[in-house]
DNA sequence: TCACTAAGAAAGTCTTAGCGA
DNA sequence: TCGCTAAGACTTTCTTAGTGA
């Protein structure tokens, strides 16, 4: 995936990572990546250079505490609804 | 992507397609695919053999009338919340 | 340590050309 | 017409090895 395909993933990922106070590399390692590849891969995801497979998305969602649907949500209003649902769990 | 990566995409896609009463090929063509590739590609998506890029996901979501987030939602309860939000738009 | 990147290796998707029901 | 599939063509992601702040 390149950064011109309209995916909200890069932005939502960065939002959630910053909220947790993690570096790109830290987040990758916590999500189970090898420490030598975590920095490059997470940076590529966050800049929309590449897109991860869903197994990786699940791992990131667990570390960051957000539903997987959040990463793919185009509408800001729905993104809030998703986060509110998560908070009420 | 293969069908063992835990993505809810195949199931959610099929659900939404059946609700609309479309064939796999019809849906692909309506989403802008060449009529010679629509059947194979849609079948691969629905069976989890391959995963589409986000541009394709946006096209499918517009034809089916569901938010893109719905396709990637793991939790049934949240999926209902997403569909309720869409219905109230 | 941080964010970030080029480029080859590796792994993925897409197209073609079919199948049986 | 429907759902579905193998396999080669094609395109993507991942890893390595770095950069500059």
Image (cartoon, coloured by chain):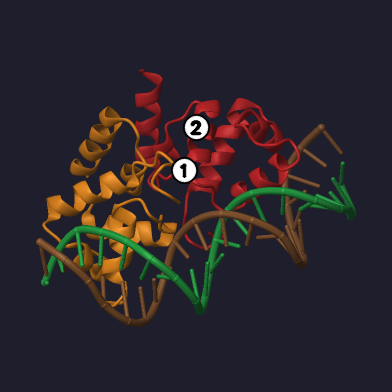
Chain colours: A orange, B red, C green, D brown
Q: Chain of mark 1?
A: B
Q: Are marks 2 and 1 on the same chain?
A: yes
Position of the C terminus of chain A, as image quadrant, is: top left
Mark 2 lies on residue: B61
Q: Point out residue C18 in the picture as x, y percentages from the top left corner.
A: 89, 53
Q: Relative to B38, does residue A31 appear above or below in the rendering?
A: below
Tell me the quarter of the picture where residue A55 sits. bottom left
Q: Relative to C5, does residue A82 appear above or below in the rendering?
A: above
Q: Point out residue C6 in the picture as x, y percentages from the top left corner.
A: 38, 65
Q: Nearer the viewer, mark 2 or mark 1?
A: 1
Q: How many marks?
A: 2
Q: Nearer the viewer, residue B75 or A57?
A: A57
* Residue neighbourhood size for the residue with mark 2, other residues' Cα within 10 Å, grouped as few (<14), some (14–19), many (≥20): some
Q: Nearer the viewer, residue B9 or C1?
A: C1
Image point (62%, 32%), residue name: B32
Q: Point out residue A10 in the picture as x, y percentages from the top left corner.
A: 31, 48
Can residue B28 be seen in the rendering of this structure?
A: yes
Image point (13%, 55%), residue name: A20
Image point (51%, 41%), residue name: B12
Mark 1 lies on residue: B54
In the displayed structure image, the side of residue C3 where residue B79 appears, left or right: right
In the displayed structure image, the side of residue B70 where residue A64 appears, left or right: left
Q: Relative to B63, does residue B76 appear above or below in the rendering?
A: below
Q: Secondary structure at mark 2?
A: helix
Q: Point out residue B38 in the picture as x, y percentages from the top left corner.
A: 69, 40
Can residue B3 be seen in the rendering of this structure?
A: no
Whether tag 2 and tag 1 are in contact, CB under 8 A, the answer is no
Q: Residue furthest top?
A: B89
Mark seen at residue A74: none
Q: Secondary structure at mark 1?
A: helix
Q: Chain of mark 2?
A: B
Q: How far is the residue under mark 2 from the one under mark 1?
A: 10 Å
């Amino acid at each position: 995936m390149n950064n011109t395909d309209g995916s909200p993933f890069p932005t939502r990922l960065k939002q959630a990572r910053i909220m947790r106070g993690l570096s790109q590399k830290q987040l990758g390692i916590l999500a189970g990546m090898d420490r030598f590849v975590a920095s490059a891969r997470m940076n590529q995801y966050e800049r929309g250079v590449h897109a991860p497979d869903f197994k990786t998305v699940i791992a990131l969602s667990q570390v960051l505490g957000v539903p997987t649907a959040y990463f793919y949500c185009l509408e800001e209003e729905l993104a809030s609804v998703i986060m509110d649902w998560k908070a009420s769990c």
